[in-house]
Amino acid sequence: MNIPTIFLQRYDPLYNAYLAGYWQQVPREKMLIRPHPRANSIAWNLWHIARCEDAGLNRFVVDGTQVLDDGNWLERMQLPWRHHGSGMSLAEVDELDKRINLHALQEYSQAVQERTRTLLKSLKLDDLDDAMEENHLKKILVDEGLAHSNAEGFIKNYLGWTKGKCLLTFGLTHSWQHLGEMEVLASLLRIEFG
């Protein structure tokens, strides 16, 4: 089995079934609600998933450009932030919920998915053993503004990660983790999926 086949066995259901259900069945106004004072919104989770996948795969795994930079996405989504959202305060999440253009977010997420599928075809198994180096991480997290806060903590955490670990974490496990959070939010918002 090759990399795309293995990866897509978990990626396709994530996007084509589970996350697609949120875009198809959740009323837009409910996506923007934090149903508990200490919870994020569904919209924040969808944005965060897309940002982490975009930066994690396109900058960490292949050292290319982010989708964010190739389509005027910040302006289209009506957001001022390049970071990936980790470390945002709940007040900042509220600000995101007030600003974000959900239609543009959905399009951005789709563009990230398309790029991921293209990227997978170019990966070679041997390339995935290469490890993250400190200078490269600083460039992405600090110079390019991917880290919202605590850049040094992220650098320390990601130092030594292989490109393979980045691929699986930012392309799959991280997104599935946030899908679980979204399922709790949907339950609190009394959203029923048909």
Image (tube, rainbow, N blue to C red):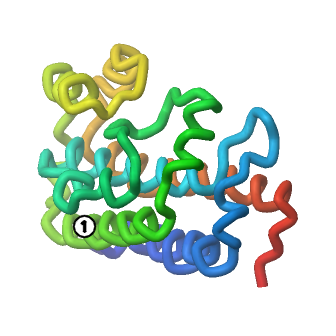
Q: In the drawing, does residue 189 fall left or right of residue 20?
A: right
Q: Nearer the viewer, residue 102 or 116?
A: 102
Task: Report the number of numbered marks.
Answer: 1
100 up-or-down from 159: above or below: below
x and y, in percent, of residue 168 in the image: 39, 52
**Left or right of 77 on screen, residue 57:** left
Q: Which residue is drawn at 29% across and 24% down?
A: 159
- Where is residue 116 drawn, in percent x and y? 28, 65
| Image quadrant assignment for residue 160 | top left
Residue 89 picture quarter: top right
Q: Residue furthest bottom?
A: 194
Give the residue at x 53% y 75%: 13
Q: Is residue 167 left or right of residue 42?
A: left
Specify the quadrant that holds the N terminus: bottom left
* Secondary structure found at label 1: helix
Q: Where residue 176 sits: x, y (%)?
A: 57, 56
Which percent across, then down, holds residue 23? Answer: 58, 74
Which residue carries the number 1 mark?
115
Q: Which residue is drawn at 68% across and 79% down?
A: 25
Q: In which quarter of the image is the C terminus?
A: bottom right
Which residue occupies the foreground of this view, 91 or 42?
A: 91
Rendering quarter of residue 155: top left
Q: In this view, does 10 lie above or below 94?
A: below
Q: Residue at x 36, y 64 (%)?
A: 108
Q: What residue type is labelled 1?
A: Arg
Crowding at mark 1 (Cα within 10 Å: few <14, some 14-19, many 20+): some
